[in-house]
Image: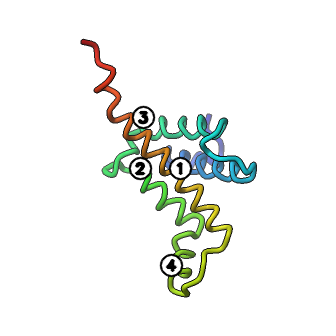
Amino acid sequence: MTTESDAGCTLADQILNQLETLLQNASDATEPLELEPWRSRLFELFVTAEGAGYVSEEAEADLTADGLCRSLSARWGLTEAARESASRQEKLAPQHVGQMRLLWSVMRMWMEWTYAWSRWSEFHTSE
């Protein structure tokens, strides 16, 4: 179902928006992404992204683990915060550290699923 706010968005944008909302909700609940219901919801987004062909660096929209990291880092201001932190030789603000931890969790799971998905046929072919 398409909402008014989704009307101008591509599927990749919708996936990224839903991912951002999921991460915020998990953070607000102070629950790790590796637990339910977050893991299942995250995996559904991965399956959608993979099915659309976005989990590839050559894709029209890069929703690989690295691509997600770049996009969410830019949205959250983490890229700039990390630059400023390094140039001032100061620690990152606690909010940014929390967001980075979320990104690391997403990236780890996304990379594991990408690897497993790419090798599925090796282990599930009929003889």
Q: Do the numbered discs 4 and 1 sit on residues whose CB atoms are within 8 Å?
A: no
- Kind of element beneath mark 3: helix
Q: Earlier in the sequence, mark 4 or mark 1?
A: 4
Q: CA distance from mark 3 to mark 4?
A: 35 Å
Q: Nearer the viewer, mark 1 or mark 2?
A: 1
Disc 3 marks which residue?
Answer: 51
**Of 95 and 18, the residue lying toward us:** 95
Q: Earlier in the sequence, mark 4 or mark 2?
A: 2
Q: Do the numbered discs 3 and 4 sit on residues whose CB atoms are within 8 Å?
A: no
Residue at x 42%, y 56% (from the top left corner): 66
Residue at x 66%, y 36% (from the top left corner): 37
Disc marking residue 64: 2
Q: Earlier in the sequence, mark 2 or mark 3?
A: 3
- Kind of element beneath mark 1: helix
Disc marking residue 106: 1
Q: CA distance from mark 4 to mark 2?
A: 23 Å
Residue at x 65%, y 74% (from the top left corner): 93
Residue 14, given in percent of the width and then of the height, sits at 55, 46
- Kind of element beneath mark 4: helix
Q: Amino acid at mark 1?
A: Val
Q: Earlier in the sequence, mark 1 or mark 3?
A: 3
Disc marking residue 83: 4
Work out which quarter of the rendered image holds the C terminus and state it.
Answer: top left
Q: Amino acid at mark 2?
A: Thr
Q: CA distance from mark 1 to mark 2?
A: 11 Å
Q: CA distance from mark 1 to mark 3?
A: 18 Å
Q: Amino acid at mark 4?
A: Arg
Circle 1: is it few (<14), some (14-19), or many (20+) Cα within 10 Å? Answer: many
Residue 19, given in percent of the width and then of the height, sits at 58, 48
